[in-house]
Image: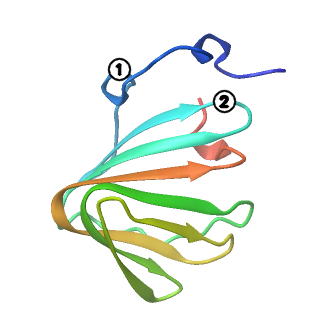
């Protein structure tokens, strides 16, 4: 098995041990990835710059771990609170709008997003 982060197998990590990237105003990201999967931890500020976009190559599983947000998929708003999951189909325009802080959004990608890999 080939993996980008072989040292991470059987290793306990915490999100605050991973480097944080300021994506745009109000959005901070931490990424955990192997060749097979990727998990992105986003800290989102209420009033952040919104970023409608789509992914043609993979579905995206969204989890709101803290706070509350409206998650838009093809123009339809989904009210999400801590503990909520939402599957975003590939090709769908989507974006998140935090409505309660702190808001933590965790995204799961299989395969990993090539644009976020080092």
Residue at 81%, 21% (x, y): give it: 2
Assign a secondary structure to mark 1.
helix
Q: Does 106 appear above or below 97?
A: above
Percent from the top left, x then y, of residue 60? Answer: 59, 61
Q: Quadrant of residue 22?
A: top left
Crowd class of label 2 (few under 14; some 14 to 19; many from 20; radius 10 Å): some
Percent from the top left, x then y, of residue 28? Answer: 31, 44
Left or right: residue 103 compared with residue 96? left
Quarter containing the N terminus: top right
Assign a secondary structure to mark 2.
loop
| Foreground of the two, 37 or 95 | 37
Residue at 36%, 30% (x, y): give it: 15
Query: Distance of mark 1 from mark 2, alpha carbons?
Result: 17 Å
Quarter containing the C terminus: top right
State the mark number for residue 17: 1
CB under 8 Å between callouts 1 and 2?
Answer: no
Left or right: residue 73 compared with residue 66? right
Residue at 64%, 19% (x, y): give it: 5
| Foreground of the two, 35 or 8 | 8
Left or right: residue 1 compared with residue 71? right
Crowd class of label 1 (few under 14; some 14 to 19; many from 20; radius 10 Å): few
Q: How many marks?
A: 2
In this view, the residue farthest toward the bottom is 75
Q: Does 1 appear above or below 78?
A: above
In this view, the residue farthest toward the right is 1
Q: Does 43 appear above or below 9?
A: below
| Foreground of the two, 44 or 11 | 11
State the mark number for residue 76: none
Residue of label 2:
34
Residue at 48%, 60% (x, y): give it: 62
Q: Does 64 appear above or below 28?
A: below
């Amino acid at each position: 098995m080939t993996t980008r982060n072989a040292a991470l197998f059987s290793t306990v990590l915490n999100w605050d041990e991973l480097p944080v990237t300021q994506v745009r105003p109000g959005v901070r990201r931490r990424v955990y990835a192997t060749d097979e999967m990727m998990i992105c931890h986003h800290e989102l500020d209420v009033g952040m710059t919104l970023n409608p976009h789509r992914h043609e190559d993979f579905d995206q599983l969204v989890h709101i771990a803290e706070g509350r947000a409206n998650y838009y998929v093809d123009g339809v708003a989904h009210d999400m609170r801590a503990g909520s999951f939402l599957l975003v189909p590939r090709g769908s325009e989507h974006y998140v709008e935090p409505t309660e802080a702190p808001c933590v959004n965790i995204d799961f990608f299989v395969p990993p997003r090539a644009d976020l890999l080092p």
